[in-house]
Image: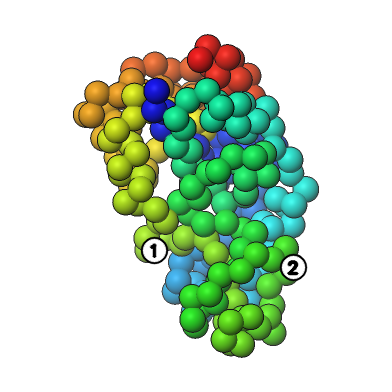
Amino acid sequence: MKVFILTGAGISAESGIATFRDADGLWARHRIEDVATPDAFARNPGLVRDFYNARRAQVSQARPNAAHLALVDLAGKVDLTLVTQNVDGLHHRAGSNALEMHGALRRNLCADCGHRWDSADPMTANTPCPHCGAHAVRPDVVWFGEIPHGLDAIETAVTTCDIFAAIGTSAQVYPAAGLSHAAQAAGAQTWEFNLDPTGPGFDHFCQGPATQTVPAWVQSF
């Protein structure tokens, strides 16, 4: 059985990672246009680095929760493709081989040569690229206006799966928004796991915290 799972911010909320909509989260204190676009980095790289340094520090204190761990168990039962919109790295820390379509906070990216490298240290204007030596470090995350990672592999997997599940994501922003429809059109059974339904279109809806609903679902396989 082939299972395709798309996860979003909701799966990490119980690990203490703020979502975009949290009134007291990091995102509430900044406009997306100021911290999450290539133009923002060009205008004020210091502000952008400081914002993502704060997010990196927050994530370092978080731990994978029961939902992350349940998906590790699921990989041992089915042919699983796990894709996440999250950049917190919690799926990888739990032991999953997740495709991080929006990048990862734990990696740096050189804006000059495109080299990527793992780093937990704060980014500064003096951080050199280990490949070219340029001082143009940015977080290796996909900003608005940039192309998500792995789209070809994602398209292949979602159109050949038997079950599609969206966990903790509104899936209302493209390209993620089209994945459930593509899976359904190919004959897959579709599931949504969220605190509240995001709208019609899924065959099944499981309401509640991901740490409760996802492990229970995995047990059914």
| Dot 1: element | loop
193 left or right of 55 in image:
left
Could you tell me if residue 92 is visible in this image? yes
Instruction: Report x, y in % for residue 111.
Output: 51, 78
Which image quarter holds the N terminus? top left
Which residue type does callout 2 highlight?
Asp
* Circles 2 and 1 in contact, beta carbons < 8 Å: no
Residue located at (49% from left, 83% from top): 112
Give the amino acid at mark 1: Glu
Q: Is residue 130 above or below residue 213?
A: below
Mark 2 crowdedness (10 Å alpha carbons): few <14, some 14-19, many ≥20? few
Query: Which residue is under mark 1?
Result: 146
Please identify the quarter of the rendering in which residue 62 is found: top right
Q: Quadrant of residue 199?
A: top left
* Above/below status of 59 relative to 188: below
| C-alpha gap between disc 2 and disc 1 | 24 Å
Q: Which mark is residue 121?
A: 2
